[in-house]
Image: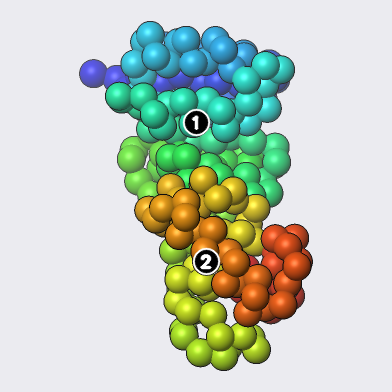
Amino acid sequence: MAIRMIVAEDHEVTRRAIMAHLESMPLEVISETVSGAETLEKVLGMSPELLLLDIRFPDVDGFEILKQLHQADSSPRIAIVSTFESPTYVARSIVWGAEDFLSKGMPARDFKAALERFVAGQSPYPAAAFSRTRDLLMRRRDRGTLHGSSLTYREYQLLRHLALGLSNHEITLSLQISIETVKEHVQNILRKTDASDRTQLAVWATREGIV
C-alpha cells in the first residue's frame, strides 16, 4: 500500500515542482492544501503518514500547525519546506517535531534526494542544516573556563538554544526540563557572561563560536 502524504504549499509553481519530484516515489498525495487552516483540517481528518509543510501561509503559519500537531494524539511525520533557511527556523522545526527541513533554494537534484530520504524514513544527510542544528542543540561544552566563562555543561547547551532564538518554552521541550530551571539557567548565564539580555548573549555566543 502506498504511503499517504499531504503537500501543504500555497505557491502554485512551487507546489507543482514538488509534485513533479514526488511522481516517482512510492506514495499517494491525498491532498494539496494552500492555507494553514485547510492543512490542519485535512491532516486531522485524513490522517496521512507524511506531511510536507511550508512555513508561510496567509492565515496560520507552519509553526502554529507544528505546535497543534505536536499536541495531537497522532501526527504524521513532517518535513518543513521553506524559502527561509534561517538557523532559528531550523531549530524551531526540530523542537516542534519535524523530521527534516528542506530549503526551496536547494539544487533540484539535492531537493529530490532529501525528499526520497524523508519518504523512506531515513535520517537527513549529516551535512544537512537540520542534522547540524540538531547536533548543535544536543552537544555540550566541557566544564571550565572555556571562552572566558565558567559555564556548566548544561549552561553551554542552553546557551546554544538561546543563541538560536528559541523561547523558554521551546527550550523546556527540547531539553525536557522545567520552565523554572530554564529561567534559573538563563540568569546564571547572564551573570557569568556579564550580558544584559538575551540579545547580547546571542551575539557573545556567535562571536565565541559556540553556535
Using the rendered image of the protein, determine whether residue 134 is visible from the camera's viewpoint: no
Q: Nearer the viewer, residue 62 or 14?
A: 62
Question: Image check: 180 left or right of 208?
Answer: left
- Mark 1 touching mark 2, by CB under 8 A? no
Where does the image place residue 149, in percent across and percent down from the top left? 61, 85
Residue sitting at the far left: 1
| Residue ID at (45%, 10%) | 42
Residue with the mark numbered 1: 66
Left or right of 64, for residue 174:
left
Q: Is residue 170 above or below residue 143?
A: above
Q: Is residue 164 left or right of residue 78?
A: right
Q: Report x, y in % for residue 140.
A: 46, 73
Q: Quadrant of the N terminus?
A: top left
Query: x, y (%) of residue 82?
Result: 64, 36
The answer to whether residue 83 is above or below residue 65 is below
**Residue 24: quadrant of the picture:** top left
Q: How is the image coloured?
A: rainbow
What residue is at 62 percent from the left and 45 percent from the top? 89
- Separation of residues labelled 1 and 2 (CA atoms): 27 Å
Q: Pointer 2: what residue?
A: 185
Of mark 1 and mark 2, the one earlier in the sequence is 1
Query: Between 111 and 100, which is closer to the camera in this rendering?
Result: 100
2 to 187, vertically: above or below: above
What mark, if any, has residue 190 been given in the picture? none
Residue for point 46% across, 84% down: 142
Quadrant of the rendered image containing residue 196: bottom right
What residue type is disc 2 on?
Answer: His
Quarter placement of the C terminus:
bottom right
Element under disc 2: helix
